[in-house]
Image (spheres, coloured by chain):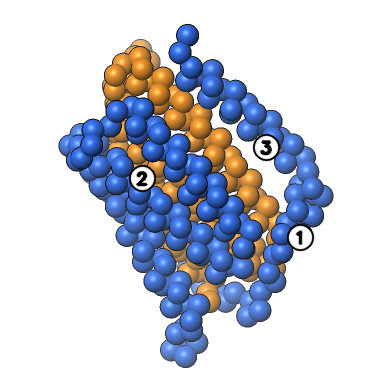
Chain colours: A blue, B orange
Amino acid sequence: MFASDVLVAQNIGFAIIATIMVVGALRVVTTSNVVHAALWLVVVLAGAAAQYILLAAEFVAITQVLVYIGAVMVLFLFGTMLTRARIGAESDLNNKNWFFGIPVAIALFVAMAMALDSGFGSQKMPADPAVATTQEISDQIFGPYLLPFWALSFVLLAAVVGAIVLARRD
Amino acid sequence: MFVNQFLILAAVLFCIGVYGVIARKNAVLVLMSIELILNSVNINLLAFSMRNGSFDGHTFALYIIAIAAAEVGVGLAMVLLMYRNRRSIDLDELSEMKG
């Protein structure tokens, strides 16, 4: 690989966004304040939306912003509020044996990185990728993937009913 | 752009999420770690979709986003129920299922 191949605008953008995402994700799992963790999660989700744009997936990126950063984050903040998390740092957010997570995560990453390196090596993305327009995505959803779409509608209905049944007071 | 740069980023996010699920005790933070894992899967799906020049991955990514929203809704309702019954959302205090 040559520097002129690697240092293109897309890769520089990728590197900046990826760094921000990894830092944000590490803060989500290490911070001692639940509200801060939710706000760092917003950083990671917004970075993911930016990566989707780099991957020529505009519709998914917009859906990510609407659903994740809009709805899911509001749910998380409501969840923290209703369970009366203390404002400020808490000392007991981690398990007693939290350090066992570190070797597990590192071993998992080494295994995946080796598999990815041997599987895809220095394969490149196509130089002029096809951009998925919203029309093509809707042709997919309402064409070959209609049955999963129906199943998904039932899952969402069941989830809404289940959430109400679980959370209401009676 | 290499294929692997997206896949490695997704692997890093996945491992951080796994660490969060193992290390955290607070139920809301465990749910946030699960969101990290689901997002890394979405990045993978879209990377492969671009590599293969097909749009199937976009559809699957959208379905995963919908599933994740449903999962968070039910998960937070369960956390709320847990808080109401025992005034705490620490997962290691849910030990009544021990034989």
Furthest residue in direction right, as rendered: A143
| Residue at (20% x, 40% y) in the render | A88
Instruction: Identify whether A111 is placed above or below A163.
Output: below
Across and down, in percent, residue A105 comes to 34, 50
- Circles 1 and 3, Cβ within 8 Å, touching? The answer is no
Q: Which mark is residue A136?
A: 1
Position of A161 with respect to A38 (left or right) is right
| Residue at (35% x, 14% y) in the render | B85
Instruction: Identify whether A146 is placed above or below A45.
Output: above
| Residue at (25% x, 47% y) in the render | A31
Across and down, in percent, residue B48 comes to 61, 63
Q: CA distance from mark 2 to mark 3?
A: 26 Å
Pointer 1 or 2: first along the chain: 2
- Residue type, mark 3 in image: Leu
Mark 3 — on which chain does it sit? A
- Circles 2 and 3, Cβ within 8 Å, touching? The answer is no
- Residue type, mark 2 in image: Ala
Mark 2 — on which chain does it sit? A
- Number of other residues with Cα within 10 Å of mark 3, as a class: few under 14, some 14 to 19, many 20 or more: some
**For mark 2, what is the residue?**
A38
Pointer 1 or 3: first along the chain: 1
Position of B79 with respect to B69 (left or right) is left
Across and down, in percent, residue B75 comes to 46, 30
Q: CA distance from mark 1 to mark 3?
A: 20 Å
Residue toward you, B29 or A124? B29
Q: CA distance from mark 1 to mark 2?
A: 34 Å
- Residue type, mark 1 in image: Glu
